[in-house]
Image (tube, coloured by chain):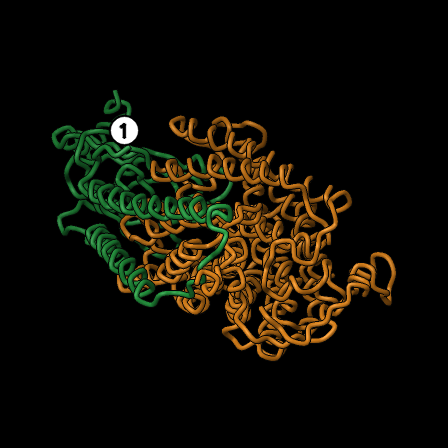
Chain colours: A green, B orange
């Protein structure tokens, strides 16, 4: 569930798990207190209630302590978001075009593919455009997503940390075959990628062929 | 609540048996009595709710196996669209305010009716017309809308399905909601009984008051936005349609400027119900009355400023993203304050575990899970990953169904004896609560797991690795439905077979328990004079003098 696929995905998972941890602790505290009070102060055990109208220091405490926790979460989230939105200058630019219901990836040499091939550990910059309705490019393994909206160029970047292939999905509802708008991002080692890229540049190899080779 | 000069005549006919101008069904659909209108809403809303439940059940069944299980993709897409439209506009938004707000709010503040009784009836008619429009779109050629309840442009402009009737339905329902809000604000300002100052109002009324302001201020925006989408579809004016130079993101902003506050229209009355019911069964005053009351207003206010957290992936400026994430965390604070005050209200109470309290306890637990997952969603780095996945769907079902839905069930079991003058059977009610709680969690908890693993929402089909989670979830939907059927059967059978309910079966101190069950036409023979706060249970305390 939490295997490392990119440096950024590790950060997101760590943030997620720490918030889940805090949440579980507080949730358990609330539930235990709730059930304990219901049992301990049942009408049988405690026929006479005590009317406590409130307690201002307590109110301040349970306003400020959550506030501090929330600000911590906010900071972590913002930190991650900044990492995700600052595209490294050396990133390899790819033009992504979405239409109902397929993806096209255009490399700097003008060759287009339906599967995204990338060299491992190299930052990739995806420029997103849509030919029809809203879509959203989503790579669950990398924990990244960006909407693809007509008349608007959104940018997304990532860096893989292993040689592997991952799913690309569409995350913005786009009609009949929305659930089938899947493709793959294939991360290859640099030498293999170079070779493939040269071959498609010279027209010696069909770009689609490479998917078969690399997933063997 | 101690009141002076309190006279209620048990011999007066209740509002069901009072002489009316019209007879038969007309005595209902033309009635301006807030209690009859409340019942009208209850009946119509239950019909739409069950239709939407059926759609949800079919969706879960479709998800049982990858590929086709029962329906084709187009049918599935219309299912989740209609499920969303009906659940939101016809069940959750009107649910507590229009049914229990209408029936109980005037009584809770010591009034004979709402300020504008005829406008109240008009609201119900608009509600009915809107509901029928939503249903009619299913049977027109072209088929039901398949846009999702969010009607995102450009898809909603391109699709050939019946989007217009659905838009018109939402528009009409919006008007119904605005009129109810206007009515409630005026009623609460102008018609409180003598002595009922703002801080002697029951907390359910406070939550309705905060809700009503959102209804009045935010709903017009979505009304106009949906009209603009209709114009776009009919005449291609180019406001939102990128093909004509329009901006689809503008649509999303306008939509969420209403639809996020609408989330608080949905949950605030639910929070109010918890605050209302807890003290009665804990037989003690609520802890932190003013903090709970003010937190409703705070939620209504800050909740109006966080809409763009639905849009962190559209490519907003970093400043926008920063501000909206920050405000989102701020709006969680008043909700947290409420939860802590509720728990503190149980402390040193004298607690009787009756059916309404059981639903409230489930509410608190599920609302907390909804809240914590909300914090995760507010955290930008996580939001980007789980936006538009099952994680979001799980989150809002925990808040809307686990919260408001269970709040509505609690309210139903709490006010049932008052509304119908009968008491339901406790055994089946407890069983239904147990099945609903188990079914709900089995159904929706796997959504969080699937969502984090990358299962996008609104998917007709899924990858094989999600099958186990989907199957557990579908199993949950079957448990849930059994609980729902038992609950409804128990409530329906008890209408005739239940034992007669006394005026105050729970020992509540608010005004509705001081009038007969069911109440007479104008609720009070003589308007009561209020001298204390709403949850004064001091008479049950141990008397200190005795010990001496």
Say whether residue B373 is left or right of residue A188. Answer: right
Residue at x 65%, y 69% (from the top left corner) = B106
Say whether residue B77 is left or right of residue B21. Answer: left
Q: Relative to B165, does residue B297 appear above or below in the rendering?
A: below
Q: Can the viewer see residue B473 in this picture? A: yes
Residue position for label 1: A206
Q: Relative to B519, does residue B469 appear above or below in the rendering?
A: above
Q: Nearer the viewer, residue A186 or B352?
A: B352
Q: Relative to A207, does residue B502 appear above or below in the rendering?
A: below
Q: Position of residue A199 (x, y in %)?
A: 19, 30
Chain identifier of the residue bearing label 1 in the image? A
Say whether residue B399 is left or right of residue A68. Answer: right
Residue at x 76%, y 42% (from the top left corner) = B497
Location of the N terminus of chain B by quadrant is bottom right
Q: Nearer the viewer, residue A186 or B90?
A: B90
Q: Position of residue B356 (x, y in %)?
A: 57, 49
Q: Quadrant of residue B141?
A: top right
Crowd band around label 1 with a 10 angstrom C-alpha radius: few (<14), some (14–19), many (20+): some
Q: Position of residue B54 (x, y in %)?
A: 62, 39
Location of the C terminus of chain B by quadrant is bottom left
């Amino acid at each position: 569930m939490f295997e490392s696929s990119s440096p950024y995905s590790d950060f997101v998972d760590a943030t997620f798990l720490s918030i889940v941890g805090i949440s579980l602790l507080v949730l358990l505290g609330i539930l235990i207190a709730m059930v304990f009070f219901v049992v301990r102060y049942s009408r049988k055990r405690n026929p006479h209630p005590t009317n406590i109208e409130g307690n201002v220091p307590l109110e301040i405490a349970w306003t400020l302590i959550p506030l501090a926790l929330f600000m911590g979460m906010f900071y972590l989230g913002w930190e991650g978001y900044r990492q995700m939105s600052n595209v490294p200058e050396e990133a390899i630019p790819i033009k992504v075009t979405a239409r109902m219901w397929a993806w096209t990836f255009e490399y700097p040499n003008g060759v287009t593919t339906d599967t995204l091939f990338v060299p491992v550990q190299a930052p990739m910059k995806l420029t997103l455009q849509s030919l029809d309705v809203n879509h959203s490019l989503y790579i669950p393994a990398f924990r990244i997503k960006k909407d693809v909206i007509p008349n608007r160029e959104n940018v997304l970047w990532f860096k893989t940390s292993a040689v592997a292939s991952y799913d690309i999905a569409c995350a913005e509802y786009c009609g009949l075959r929305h659930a089938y708008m899947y493709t793959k991002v294939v991360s290859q080692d640099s030498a293999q990628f170079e070779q493939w890229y040269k071959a498609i540049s010279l027209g010696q190899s069909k770009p689609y062929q490479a998917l078969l080779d690399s997933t063997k | 609540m101690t009141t002076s000069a309190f006279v209620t005549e048990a011999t007066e006919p209740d509002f069901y048996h009072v002489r009316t101008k019209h007879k038969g069904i007309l005595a209902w659909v033309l009635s301006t009595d807030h209690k009859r209108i409340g019942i009208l809403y209850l009946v119509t809303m239950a019909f739409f709710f069950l239709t939407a439940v059926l759609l949800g059940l079919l969706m879960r069944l479709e998800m049982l196996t990858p590929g086709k299980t029962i329906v084709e993709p187009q049918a599935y897409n219309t299912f989740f669209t209609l499920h969303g439209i009906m659940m939101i506009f016809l069940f959750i938004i009107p649910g507590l305010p229009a049914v229990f707000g209408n029936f109980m709010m005037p009584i809770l503040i010591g009034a004979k009716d709402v300020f504008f009784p005829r406008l109240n009836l008009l609201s119900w008619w608009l509600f009915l017309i809107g509901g029928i429009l939503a249903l009619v779109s299913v049977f027109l050629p072209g088929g039901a809308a398949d846009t999702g309840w969010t009607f995102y442009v450009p898809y909603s402009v391109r699709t050939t399905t019946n989007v217009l009737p659905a838009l018109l339905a939402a528009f009409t329902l919006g008007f119904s909601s605005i009129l109810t809000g206007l009515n409630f604000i005026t009623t609460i300002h102008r018609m409180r009984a003598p002595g009922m100052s703002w801080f002697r109002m029951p907390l359910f009324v406070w939550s309705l008051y905060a809700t009503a302001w959102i209804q009045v201020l935010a709903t017009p925006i979505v009304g106009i936005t949906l009209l603009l989408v209709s114009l776009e579809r009919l005449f291609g004016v180019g406001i939102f349609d990128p093909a004509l130079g329009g901006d689809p993101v503008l649509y999303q902003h306008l939509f969420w400027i209403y639809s996020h506050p609408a989330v608080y229209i949905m949950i605030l009355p639910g929070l109010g119900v918890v605050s209302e019911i807890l003290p009665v069964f804990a037989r003690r005053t609520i802890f932190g009355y003013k903090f709970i009351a003010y937190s409703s207003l705070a939620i209504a206010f800050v909740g109006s400023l966080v809409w763009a957290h639905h849009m962190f992936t559209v490519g907003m400026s970093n400043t926008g993203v920063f501000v909206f994430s920050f405000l989102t965390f701020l709006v969680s604070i008043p909700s947290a304050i409420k939860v802590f005050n509720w728990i503190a209200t149980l402390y040193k109470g004298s607690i009787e575990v009756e059916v309404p309290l059981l639903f409230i306890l489930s509410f608190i637990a599920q609302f907390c899970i909804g809240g914590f997952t909300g914090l995760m969603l507010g955290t930008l780095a996580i939001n980007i990953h789980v936006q538009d996945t099952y994680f979001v769907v799980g989150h809002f079902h925990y808040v809307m169904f686990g919260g408001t839905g269970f709040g509505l069930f609690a309210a139903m079991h709490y006010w049932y004896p008052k509304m119908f003058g009968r008491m339901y059977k406790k055994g089946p009610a407890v069983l239904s609560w147990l099945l609903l709680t188990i079914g709900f969690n089995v159904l929706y908890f796997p959504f969080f797991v699937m969502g984090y693993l990358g299962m996008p929402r609104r998917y007709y089909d899924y990858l094989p690795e999600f099958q186990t989670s989907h199957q557990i979830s579908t199993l949950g939907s079957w448990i849930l439905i059994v609980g729902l059927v038992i609950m409804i059967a128990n409530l329906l059978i008890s209408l005739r077979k239940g034992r007669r309910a006394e005026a105050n079966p729970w020992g509540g101190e608010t005004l509705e328990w001081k009038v007969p069950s069911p109440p007479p036409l104008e609720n009070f023979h003589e308007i009561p004079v209020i001298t204390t706060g709403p949850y004064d249970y001091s008479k049950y305390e141990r008397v200190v003098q005795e010990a001496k």
